Amino acid sequence: MTNLPATETIIEITYLIATALFILSLKWLSSPKTARRGVFAGEIGMFLAIVGTLLHHGIVEYKWILIALVLGTIIGVPLGEVAMTAVPQRTALSHAFGALCVTLVGTAEFYLRTPEVPPFMMGVLSLEVILGSLTFTGSLMAAGKLQEVLPQRPITYKGQNVVNLGLLGVAIVVAGILVAHPEKTQLFPLIVGIPLVFGVMMIVPIGGADMPTVISLLNSYAGLSAAAMGFVLQSKLLIIAGALDGASGFILSVNMSKAMNRSFSNVLFGAFGQEQPSAVAGGQQARPVRSATPEEAAGILAAANKVVIVPGYGMAVAQAQHKVRELYDALTKRGVDVKFGIHPVAGRMPGHMNVLLAEADIPYDKLLDMDEINGDFPQTDVALVIGANDVTNPAARTDHSSPIFGMPILDVDKARTVMVIKRSMAAGFAGIDNPLYYLDKTLMLFGDAKSFVGSIVRELGGGHE
Amino acid sequence: MKLDLLTSLYVFMLAAFIGFEVIRRVSPLLHTPLMSLTNALDAIAVVGAIILAGEYHAHGALLAKILGTIAIVAATSNIVGGFLITDRMLRMFKASGPKKP
């Protein structure tokens, strides 16, 4: 150890370069102009680190490593080729894979090292496998809900939080015992198994609209578990990569929580979905709304100078983004200024709407964040809401009794005319009635987002049909 | 190269600060690619899995080999899939330039 052999020095240098490239990679991601360079830097860094590791003199057998690398590539390629609408579940799945890797390595390390595991080492090893296993099943559950193979509605029962926290508490106590007595190998399966169950239980009460926060949180856990693995393996590279990922997930989680005006604990333990039956019932009274046909909507849009389109998860579900692009083209051709107002939690993961609209070839400088667009609404002729509900609900600003009071919203109600494409008058995810729909300036456009936008485009004489 | 506990903590703390500063500057426009990129970078855990699967172990060799190999598969699929999809997404982000014909 005192005198490093030459190859070991080379390996350490590849790790050093990889670390620098990883940081640059994230730095370049700050702007769409340099972002692709960032991916390239990350790829080079990863390649160097893997080649460097393969040079490691302690490696005596390469056969299985190479088979695994090839197999991983075979699985990875289709995961990189999924449709853009499937990106949220793909992301959740990749959090699960990352956590699986960390948990397996941690488990093997424990059995290789026991009974001589120093207390600190046992502590981080426990953290690694606890975070890793709960992220593994939690992410699989999230992916299942996003892919709709599992029910999306939150499932709650009495005492749920007590049960969940109790489970986690037991796992932490067992980890504590192992720190004191690392030779009690029979206890180890508990700090893998209990968090696996906890991961499932944690996601059961989570509903679709909470997914952006939950995915970010799982991202953060995956990063932290990898950093813990870095402590166990005493690898600076892994500690740094894990810390970067953990920080990223943490920042996104905070952003998402702020955008919903809820705390972490509220997202994890709150189960928004079915708490306001009274609000739903109250909304069912027949209050008058004004509705319009595609012809009328097209006429109003064509006469406008400034239009802001507000997309939500409904647009993704209806796969309407390409029709929206045709609408954007038709209006732009007529000299209408069209922008998009995007709420941080619109969709199922952070940035979801931006990716879908970019896929449909809408220039990114037309995609504006909530803070950038909100000042524009008073000068906007038409705000067109497509498949978004709660993020446009003015009750969040005015109604102190509303469950979403205080949540930052897109101020579409300040535009001269508001048009809302919606299937029916059913309440949104939070189960809250939206007073926006009853305003005199609001026109409801009832129908499927894709076909309705398509009809408007036909009226405007655009489209590719 | 062995690290002591305190050095590890220093490294973690500094990396976390850098992470916060760098990632705060990422535009919300790119938050989805950010997540898939950090996911790919995080799969650097493959390095630990490779050593686990390839090193000589006096006891527990079979366990290390099996778990290490599965771990490599999981991490590699994240690396390949993560970089691929991040680049695919970023290719789609175009500024509004001169209109296409």
Image: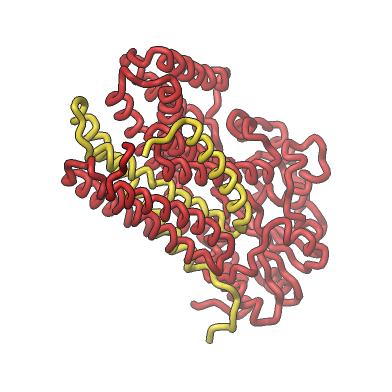
Residue lying at 38% horizontally and 23% vertically, measured from the top left: A193
Above or below for A206 versus A316? above
Of residue B72 and residue A190, the one placed in the foreground of this image is B72
Above or below for A91 versus A365? above
- Quarter where residue A433 is shown: top right
Write down which chain is painted red: A
Of residue A246 and residue A115, the one placed in the foreground of this image is A115
- Quarter where residue A340 is shown: bottom right
Q: Picture coordinates of residue A214 (x, y %)? A: 54, 39
Does residue B17 appear left or right of residue A191 in this picture? right
Residue A31 can be seen, yes or no? yes
Residue lying at 76% horizontally and 37% vertically, measured from the top left: A402
Does residue A130 appear left or right of residue A220 in this picture? left
Residue A446 can be seen, yes or no? no
Number of numbered discs on residues: 0
Colour in which chain B is shown? yellow
Residue lying at 20% horizontally and 48% vertically, measured from the top left: A67
